[in-house]
Image (cartoon, rainbow, N blue to C red):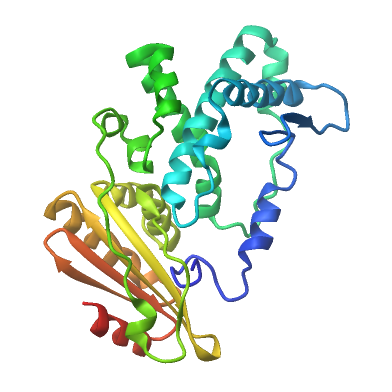
Amino acid sequence: MFRALGLLTASQDIGELQLRLLSGQVIGFYDNETKRMSLVSESGIGPGVKITYAHEYTHALQDHAFGLASLQLSAPGEDDRDLARLSLVEGDATVLMLQWALDHMTPQELLGVSQGPAPNMTDIPAWMVDDLEFPYTAGEQFVTNLRASGGTSALDAAFRSPPASTEQVLHPDKYKSREAPLKVAAPALAAGLGGGWRDLPADTLGEAMVRFWLQGVGDANPLAQQAADGWGGDRLVAATGRGGAFAVAWRLAWDSSADAAQFEQGYRAAAPHLKVSGRLVRVSDREILVVQGSSLAIVDRAVAALS
């Protein structure tokens, strides 16, 4: 899927990149299945371990109070919803971690945390880093907003009724007004391409991933953010064919025709930087179909079948 989106080249392996991205960064974790917390350190209980303990201990408290398993953070085909819920969990832990650190750590210890060794990001795509950091950074802002407007009771309520999309995380007012994602039908990509093609499971990527995607293929951050604003819903299907052929069809719904036009502008600005062939089709006033693939002939055939 990521290769068809133009985010990875043929020589890049998503699993290997994720392993490299995470290696050296995980100091500790809480396992909500075993109810155990683990910390990793080769030099005792230093500032990094202390602040990590505060973060992971918060996860243990969340699990005790609300049951983290009930949030279903890894539902198949619901990447956007999963990332939104993870943002609540990690955002809360980040807020309390920072609060604990300011209350209990010395200035020297805080400086030690900020000056810790930086992970090796060589050849790691920026969009992968953005995706990894999102639950902590955007989640912290989301939780801070909830606490500012409704105190801890609003935060507790969010764990009982978590955000449904990264749109709600990025725009807390949409969470408070319960603006639900629009239902979008998955494109019948393999059927449109003909024999020898097989659809992979459909997924919803969401506003945050639209932003990361546009940034990853060439849009500057402000333009990518503007193009992603107004997201209403989406559904994406990738397909594989004979001889390593691949394609992706992504149907996106927008809150208004102006939002759709803004996304179209962002896509057309990024299109020259795509590593794959691609086309954008305005299906209706507020709906857009993006089709990309390993050749222009495949893209044209898919567009003809789907639009």
At which x and y percent is residue 144? 42, 21
Residue at the outermost top position:
103
Q: Residue at x 23, y 57 (%)?
A: 253
Based on the displayed image, in which of its 4 quarters is residue 99 positioned? top right
At which x and y percent is residue 184? 27, 59
Q: Residue at x 47, y 28 (%)?
A: 140
Depicted 207 relative to depicted 96: above or below: below
Depicted 122 relative to depicted 246: above or below: above
Q: Closer to the camera, 185 or 50?
A: 185
At which x and y percent is residue 91? 50, 29
Q: Is residue 307 left or right of residue 235?
A: left
Q: Residue at x 31, y 34 (%)?
A: 171
Based on the displayed image, in which of its 4 quarters is residue 145 positioned? top left
Can the viewer see residue 299 in this picture? Answer: no
Q: Closer to the camera, 242 or 110?
A: 242
Q: Closer to the camera, 200 or 171?
A: 200
Depicted 267 relative to depicted 47: above or below: below
